[in-house]
Image: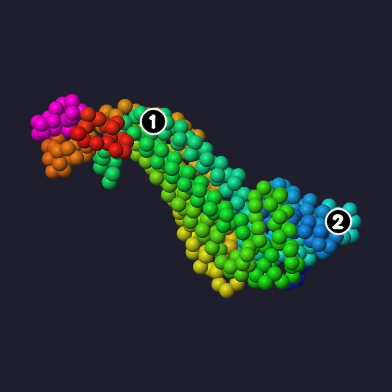
Amino acid sequence: MSNNTSSPQQTLRVERDSMGEMPVPANAYWGASTQRAVLNFPISNLRFSRSMIKALALIKLAAAKTNAENGDLPKTIADAIATAAQEVADGALDEHFVVDIFQTGSGTSTNMNANEVIARRASQHLVDSKSKIHPNDHVNMGQSSNDVIPTAIHLAALLDIKERLLPALKELSRCLGRKAKQFDKVIKTGRTHLQDATPITLGQEFLGYKGQVDNAIKRLRYAQGRLSQVALGGTAVGTGINTKAGFAKATLAELSLLTGVKVKETSNHFQAQSSIDEIVDCSGVLKTIATSIYKIANDVRWMGSGPRAGLAELLLPAVQPGSSIMPGKVNPVICESTMQVCFKVIGNDATVTLASQASSFELNVALPVAAHCLLESITLLAAASANLSGNCLKGLKATANGPALVERGLALCTALAPVVGYDLAAEIAKEAAQSGETILLVAQRKTSLSVEELKRLLDPFAMTKPGAKGSE
């Protein structure tokens, strides 16, 4: 979306704010303050996400109801604001949110964008055409950009986590759980340091992946708890100037009803507005989730490598041709896409961490970029997780290659060590590696154990369970 919101041929109207007159496109719902921001920040095509706009609008809606109940706002005006704010929350006026992400660090320009759009649209809903709703005096009543924007970030993140990321991770967990059961009897060679290790089942590997995702869900629950405490009510610097006692509590109770997401007033407004600790915390959780999902996608990619010169333990769904020059080549593109999302989320976390350093005295002045990165990470992780489940993991098949390699595995000699001693077991492994023979064949020559006893000790499935013992 371009920042060029007017042209010489475009019909303009004149709006006014505290700095004076400003030409604005005639069909625009925004006003002078927003237009100044458009002109001041011609930086990128990045805008706040749908969830952020929705969160802002719902805050304005809830505040209008509270102000009417407190007797500070005429009911007719409050109702008009509520109607207009609901339209914004529903996405009907998204084209009128035109301020770049890289703007004033408090997000004041976007708060005013919301105030002006809602005020102009609400004025159209008034039966009394002579009345005019003011963006500051009415829509922003009892609020400041300094408490509204942090609250909107928290609320938007909570909405996206609840509606997008948690459902995607739950489905990913279920998908991995199904695969763990499906692959429970598929034996394969474990690997540590990229070297052969003792046997494991493919199902056990997928059980490990499921555990990572289950832990990710637990971490998100923690982040939700942190984000649920919001800054609304602190106004400019945390003191609550120009708002009534109880305003935030009532407004947030209404917000909780509107969204189905529990939000409550912070117990320390000075902390809530002078830092973005909860945002940094949540971003760190998202980074951890990204590293987990990266590990899963990368492991699956490697196990699907081949089909002739790789591990070829898994057969990945063929979703598209893999090469413009090599016929028949199929690549692990879903895994690669997922991994790139994880890189982006990790990068976003670095940006949020740096943005936290813009907290000085009573306000952080990098709120827009922190919000953008946080919400983008949630959205990307949700989409990538769903895509990994539906277009890759769901269709995975085990090959015969993993089980076939187990018999030749040198780490099988681990089970011999308690019986013949570590040194002899190591000698057996080295000789097998040099001769190309199996551990079983070499052990027959170098130990006095019977073939039956050796086969019992070297049973790979027995090695996949705790408590495996040597000869009694």
The type of residue carrying mark 2 is Thr
Confirm whether residue 149 shows in the render. Answer: no
Give the residue displayed 55% in from the left and 69% down from the top.
Answer: 359
Residue 354, which numbered label?
none
Instruction: Provide residue 184's location: percent of width, then percent of height.
Output: 38, 31
Question: Quick one: which residue is furthest to the front in this view?
Answer: 472
- The C terminus is located in which quarter? top left
Which one is nearer the viewer's eye here, 219 or 300? 219
Residue 76, which numbered label?
2
Report the magenta residues as a range: 433-455
SS class, disc 1: loop
Instruction: Provide residue 45's location: percent of width, then percent of height.
Output: 59, 55
The type of residue carrying mark 1 is Phe
Task: Provide the residue designation for mark 1.
Answer: 183
Position of 291 compared to 451: left or right?
A: right
Other-residue count near label 2 (Cα within 10 Å), few / some / many at <14 / 14–19 / ≥20: some
Give the residue displayed 71% in from the left and 71% down from the top.
Answer: 241
Query: In the rendered image of this protein, does residue 31 appear above or below residue 384?
Result: below
